[in-house]
Image (spheres, coloured by chain):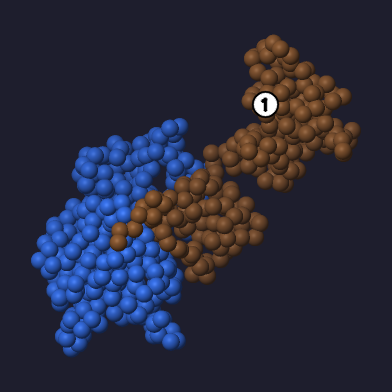
Amino acid sequence: MIRSNYLARINCFQPIPCNPCETSCPFGAILIGEDITNIPVLDITKCRGCGICVAACPGIAITMAMVTGGDKDYVAIPYEYYPLPEIGDEVTVVDANGNELGHGIVEKLKKPNKNDPTTLVFVIVDSSITKSVVGIKKYIVKDDPIICRCEEIFESEIINAIKKGDRTVDAIKRRTRSGMGMCQGKTCNRLIANIIVRELGISLSEQLPSSKRPPVGVISIKELSQEKS
Amino acid sequence: MINIELLVIGGGPAGLSAGIAAGKCGVKTIVVDENPLPGGQLFKQIHKFFGSKEHKAGTRGYKIGEQLLNEVDQDGVEVYLNTRVWGIFDNNIVGILKDGKTQKVKAQKIILATGASENAIAFKGSTLPGIMTAGAAQTFINVHRVLPGKKILMIGTGNVGLITSYQLMQAGAEVVGVVEASQNVGGYDVHANKLRRAGIPIYLGHTVIEAKGDIEVDGAIIAPVDEKFKVDKSKSFLIDCDTICFAVGLTPRIELAQMVNAPIIYMSTLGGYLPIHDNRLKITEDIFIAGDISGVEEASTAMEEGSLAGVAVAMELGKLDKNKGVKEIEEIYKRLAKLRSGQFGSKRASAKEEIIKKQMEMKGGFK
């Protein structure tokens, strides 16, 4: 087995009754014991840097860091907001109390447990701040309006889809689900077409309207199945 | 399965007029509408309509709606309310949802009179409660008789924005301003002047960049925009309001036309993507359109177009003498020409001509 250089860092210092970090660790590297208000203790000789405890901690109080010895280190941060940052994005990293420490670049995203939406965001940071990094600032500020209300797709997600090469309302729909909700794009199709105009300079007359198929409005499967003869 | 000669989808001014025109000629017609009341937007229109006598001018919108309903009744047209069309399939089979059950309707001819929906814009906070379309505000005050808010900021100076602002004031709300990104008022001056006389500021060359408020709107930040719609945030200011209304244009609802593979064209003057139709509003062999789906105009033009499509269907079904029908269509075009003239209407007239020209150029005619 390849041993990762990541090590967990536990930022949990109050005697709260909680032990998923201990029970989730497949290597027995975290010790709390019978009294679940004990403060968790990490055995660094057993930690493999798998990230399972990072995603398991209900307090979002565990991170992982890989200290390279160079200018830049790697920190894995649990993140539970949508939209997720994208690889290459610059994010603001903060300490346990939310004080801004500086910026980091997103290296990769990983979900240790595929049935759990908690995502690990791997961020490259200056090694001078590695020790203090506990989180990233909520990535999406309020400036980012929702474009597709039904599926809650933000403007930044539409722009990211365009950056990845999407050129049509339909292509963006397939990538982001915009326009696939209750209203079937009645509100957002036009907003997205206008974002394409703005970002790519493709005028509305050069764009194709998004394709439409039945059912054109909301209809339940039950209703569909009960055809009156 | 229901078999019928004509199915009209949408019971607004266009759909009802189509049903009336066809019903008068003895065409067995069903009009379906997804709303609990027919009339489309007419019953929200408490103002007197423009036009001339033949266009029912001077009559308030909801009264026109009542007249149309009476005529529909007299002409033996069936109206299915609370009935949603969810798809059109081959061989003119239409899927409808009525009383919680789906049903197939096979129609010899279909008229799509699905209308248009209101556009939105997006900015910081634009999904806060208290932000709605002008049409929604009209439904609040004129249908349900409830004020959506006390201090209202309107975005858009087209006739919808101007008329809705006026009606909101009549209903007892305070309109704190009307914001317009372009340098000119979009709608008629007579409507704008009603607001000016009431002391409502019209912020030309401005746009809303942010809605303030944690759980609902409690203000709007507006900023000037130049001719290229570039925002100057340094000159932004706050307007105290609890409601923001969008009156930023309408988009034709063409989904059903797309499902029958009608060729589509983009026409900015007429609201966006539209099915290409001929001079009898025909988009495929058996399907016609009328009203805002064929280009966003007004209720008066929608009613004329509805009559036109209804007459055209009656002719094709052999229920109306060809010569008589052609004459009627000529008369309708004369009335439409009056509505599509002048500074505001002539652009629509030429856009309409362009669509018909496109149709004539299409190879192979209708599918």
Tell whether B288 sits left or right of A220: left
Instruction: Provide the chain ID for the residue under circle 1.
Output: A
Image position, residue B201 (x, y; %): 32, 46
Name the quadrant of the N terminus of chain A. Answer: top right
Secondary structure at badge 1 equals loop
The residue lying at 29 percent from left, 66 percent from top is: B1
Determine which residue is flagged by label 1: A57
The answer to whether B296 is drawn above or below residue B236 in the figure is below
- At label 1, the amino acid type is Cys
Residue, far front? A229
> Which chain does brown denote in the image?
A
Name the quadrant of the C terminus of chain A. Answer: bottom left
The answer to whether A219 is drawn above or below residue A202 in the figure is above
The residue lying at 64 percent from left, 14 percent from top is: A17
Image position, residue A196 (x, y; %): 55, 60
Tell whether A164 sits left or right of B56: right
Tell whether B264 sits left or right of A62: left
Image position, residue B130 (x, y; %): 37, 39
Judge whether residue B363 can be spotted in this image.
Answer: yes
Residue, far bottom? B323
Quarter where residue A64 is shown: top right
The residue lying at 59 percent from left, 49 percent from top is: A157
Tell whether A8 sits left or right of B353: right
**In this orientation, which residue lies closer to the viewer: B44 or B21?**
B21
**In this orientation, which residue lies closer to the viewer: A91 or A51?**
A51
The residue lying at 23 percent from left, 64 percent from top is: B31
Image position, residue A193 (x, y; %): 51, 60
> Which chain does blue denote in the image?
B
Judge whether residue B185 can be spotted in this image.
Answer: no
The answer to whether A165 is drawn above or below residue A54 in the figure is below
| Label 1 crowd bin: few (<14), some (14–19), many (20+), radius 10 Å | many
